[in-house]
Image: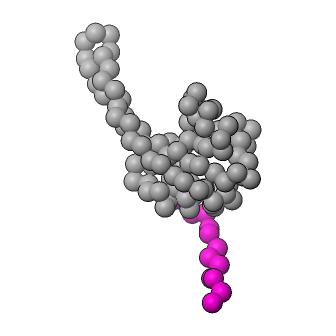
Amino acid sequence: MAEKKVKLVATAETYDVLRRPIISEKAARLSENNGVVFEIAMSATKEDVAKAMQVLFGIKPTKINIVITKGKEKTFRGRSTGTQRKVKKAYVSLPKDAKLDLATDM
């Protein structure tokens, strides 16, 4: 039986999933092996990230890992304390033939 092709359409929610690319030393090392890192919405799942990658960049990811980093405790001028916000990151592995250079594409 023939597989049914589903056309993926970009919606407002699709653009809200991937907040921004994360540029760091670890992300640079991952980019050598076809990996990218994104800050994503706290409500996003692996399926949401995969769909957003397919719609926005036209690349189907091979693997996605999601990590939530806790906000650090900070003091302001030695008096008041506060907490930075939590950040949810997606580590996305791309196929070997895929090219995605976020430094020049965005």
Q: Nearer the viewer, residue 39 or 46?
A: 46
Asked whether residue 67 appears in the rendered view, the answer is: yes
Left or right, 33 with respect to 44, comes to: right
Q: Please, is residue 12 above or below residue 1 in the view? A: above
Classified by dominant secondary structure, the portion drawn in magenta counts as: loop
Q: Is 65 placed above or below 22 here?
A: below
Q: Nearer the viewer, residue 17 or 101?
A: 101
Q: Residue at x 56, y 48 (%)?
A: 92
Frontmost residue, 2 versus 55: 2
Estimate the x, y position of residue 72 in percent, counting from the top left. 34, 26
- Whether residue 106 is visible here, answered yes or no, is no
Q: Residue furthest bottom?
A: 1
Give the percent coordinates (x, y) of residue 55: 63, 61
Residue shown at 62% from the left, 32% from the top: 29
Quarter of the rendering containing residue 52: bottom right
Q: Quadrant of residue 80?
A: top left
- Quadrant where the C terminus is found in the figure: top right
Name the residue at 40% across, 48% down: 42
Q: Is residue 44 left or right of residue 28?
A: left
- Choose top left, top right, bottom left or bottom right for residue 21: top right
Is residue 12 inside the magenta stretch? yes
Rendering coords of residue 66 (x, y %): 44, 47
Residue range (magenta): 1-14
How many tags in the picture? 0
Q: Is residue 75 magenta?
A: no
